[in-house]
Image: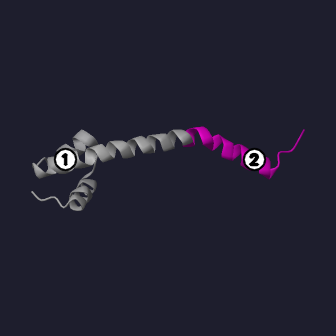
Amino acid sequence: MQDTTPAQLRSAAAASLKTPGAKRLKLLRQLEEVENELRPLVVEAWRHEVTYRDIRDATGIVANTVRLWVNKAGAER
């Protein structure tokens, strides 16, 4: 029976992260692209008095994020 060294265990653990980690990074990039597309649409919806609840229900974006985007855009109703 051969003992596994800590370095081998560490290497195996690091290797196990590669595939799911790559998937996660790809999804994060896609999410960023979608949010960049949504940001002006959400601000415009807010300008037209679409409620925070309706924005959240349609997009999954919470009120605090909507407020942040609106403030960064300098939007007014």
Q: Quadrant of the C terminus?
A: bottom left
Q: Is residue 28 magenta?
A: no
Q: Quadrant of the N terminus?
A: top right
Badge 1 marks a residue whose secondary structure is: helix
- Sort mark 1 into few (<14), some (14-19) or many (20+) by Cα contacts within 10 Å: few
Residue 21 x/y as whole percent: 56, 43
Residue type indicated by callout 2: Leu
Residue type indicated by callout 1: Arg
The residue drawn where x is 23% and y is 41% is 57
| Residue interval drawn in magenta | 1-21
* Of callouts 2 and 1, the N-terminal one: 2
Which of these two is toward me, 75 or 57?
A: 75
User: In the shown orientation, is residue 29 left or right of residue 3?
Assistant: left
| Color theme of the render | one colour
The residue drawn where x is 45% and y is 40% is 27
What type of secondary structure mainly makes up the magenta span? helix
- Sort mark 2 into few (<14), some (14-19) or many (20+) by Cα contacts within 10 Å: few
What is the total number of numbered labels drawn onto the structure image? 2
Q: Where is mark 1, residue-wise?
A: 53
The residue drawn where x is 68% and y is 45% is 13
The residue drawn where x is 62% and y is 43% is 17
Q: Where is mark 2, residue-wise?
A: 9
- Rendering quarter of residue 59: top left
Badge 2 marks a residue whose secondary structure is: helix
Q: Is residue 12 magenta?
A: yes
User: In the shown orientation, is residue 68 left or right of residue 8?
Assistant: left
